[in-house]
Amino acid sequence: MSEAENTPGASASRSAAAVVPLRSPSPPQQVAFDRHELRELFSVYGRMVACGEWRDYALDFTKDRAVFSVFRRSHEYPLYRIEKTPKLARRQGAYSVTGAAGQVLKRGHELARVLAVLEKPVKLVVG
């Protein structure tokens, strides 16, 4: 036996190492937009700000969905809410655009196609 094993505290430290304290449950995961999704969202947002249509945005993250809200003014209700709900990914699609009155304007599996509903049609200028 080595000298460390003969010390009285050595057996206590070995038995204490075998006891694993209970972990507290991990906090619930939040749903969030990834980098590519944010790039698409801010691309549309930037174009609409340049047109003067939108002025502010808000990001909300909860346990079951992530929401990108756009506003005409910061103190109003959102004009549109772009939501990512992973629970609906297989059925209806994870992404949806909801209007100010609460109606779902577009729902789908690809964010770019869902955001197309927010794009203004190009006007032909004859001069």
Image (cartoon, rainbow, N blue to C red):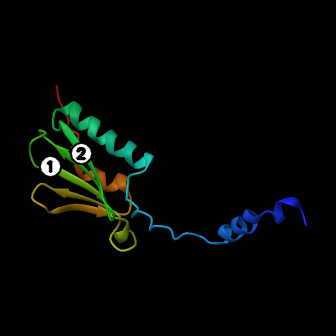
The residue that mark 2 highlights is: 58
Residue lying at the far bottom in this picture: please name it. 91
Name the kind of residue labelled 1 in the image: Pro
Residue 122 x/y as whole percent = 23, 40
The residue that mark 1 highlights is: 78
- The one nearer the camera, 10 or 114, is 10
Residue 81 located left or right of residue 90: left
- The one nearer the camera, 103 or 55, is 55
Q: Which of marks 2 and 1 is nearer the N terminus?
A: 2
Q: Which residue is drawn at 18% across and 31% down?
A: 125
Q: Residue at x 32, y 71 (%)?
A: 92
Quadrant assignment for the N terminus:
bottom right
Q: Which of marks 2 and 1 is in front?
A: 2
- The one nearer the camera, 121 or 71, is 71
Q: Distance between the residues labelled 2 and 1?
A: 9 Å
Q: Do the residues labelled 2 and 1 touch (CB within 8 Å)?
A: yes
**Which disc is residue 35 wearing?**
none
Name the kind of residue labelled 2 in the image: Ala
Classify mark 2: residues with Cα within 10 Å, few (<14), some (14-19) or many (20+).
few
Element on which disc 2 rests:
strand
127 to 101, vertically: above or below: above
Classify mark 1: residues with Cα within 10 Å, few (<14), some (14-19) or many (20+).
many
98 to 56, vertically: above or below: below
Q: Which residue is drawn at 69% across and 71% down?
A: 15
Residue 73 located left or right of residue 46: left
